[in-house]
Image: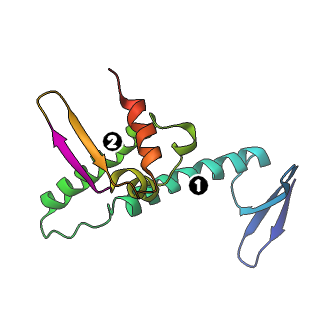
């Protein structure tokens, strides 16, 4: 459904979308000047919002906006390292169980990356000893088994 209204300065368009599902009613409204059918306008804004979510995750999850060096090349290199880390985590996400593939960076960091462990290396293997009281131990073991190719 679409209708146009006149603002004080210029003509705007209100696009409405009403959905009803088992979870309840979902009403959404957009005020825009984009031309096209209502479905196309909503698709455009949804895709744009998803891009902005990825940018925000990159900025906040990896502190990629922290470029505090005084020289340009140092900041460029720092941004390159942040980008590499972001891509590495996204590659890691592809190998996670489906329930964790959409997890935020901070969730992955606290549940899988930031762990205290004792590492013992012998001639034949490397053993990781986790604390018994660590709440995400079973999740870590599940993810570790997914990456085991032997």
Residue 59 horizontal side relative to residue 116, left or right: right
Task: Tell me if mark 1 has few (under 14), some (14-19) or many (20+) residues whose alpha carbon lies within 10 angstroms of its own.
Answer: few
Q: Residue furthest front?
A: 132
Q: Position of residue 99 (x, y in %)?
A: 57, 43
What's the magenta region?
115-121
Quick check: 60 above or below 111?
Answer: below
Residue drawn at 87 percent across, 49 percent down: 22
Q: Position of residue 26 (x, y in %)?
A: 82, 57
Quick check: 56 above or below 98?
Answer: below
- In depth, the one of 122 and 116 nearer the eye is 122
Q: CA distance from mark 1 to mark 2?
A: 23 Å
Q: Is residue 119 magenta?
A: yes
Provide the residue designation for mark 2.
88
Q: Residue 37, can we see it?
A: no
- In depth, the one of 121 and 66 nearer the eye is 121
Residue drawn at 72 percent across, 71 percent down: 10
Q: Position of residue 75 (x, y in %)?
A: 19, 61
Q: Is residue 100 magenta?
A: no
Q: Quadrant of the C terminus?
A: top left
Provide the residue designation for mark 1.
49
Q: Looking at the image, do the residues carrying marks 1 and 2 touch, with CB atoms under 8 Å apart?
A: no
């Amino acid at each position: 459904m679409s209708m146009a209204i006149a603002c004080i300065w210029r003509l705007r368009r209100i696009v409405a979308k009403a959905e009803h599902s088992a979870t309840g009613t979902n009403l959404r409204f957009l005020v825009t000047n984009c031309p096209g059918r209502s479905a196309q306008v909503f698709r455009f804004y949804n895709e744009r919002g998803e891009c902005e979510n990825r940018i925000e995750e990159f900025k906040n999850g990896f502190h990629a906006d922290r470029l505090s060096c005084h020289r340009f090349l140092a900041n460029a290199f720092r941004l390159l390292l942040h980008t590499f880390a972001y891509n590495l985590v996204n590659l890691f996400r592809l190998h996670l169980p489906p329930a964790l593939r959409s997890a935020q960076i901070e969730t992955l960091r606290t549940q899988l990356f930031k762990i205290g462990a004792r590492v013992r290396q012998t001639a034949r293997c490397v053993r990781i000893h986790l604390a018994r009281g660590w709440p995400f131990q079973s999740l870590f073991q599940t993810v570790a088994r997914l990456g085991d190719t032997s």
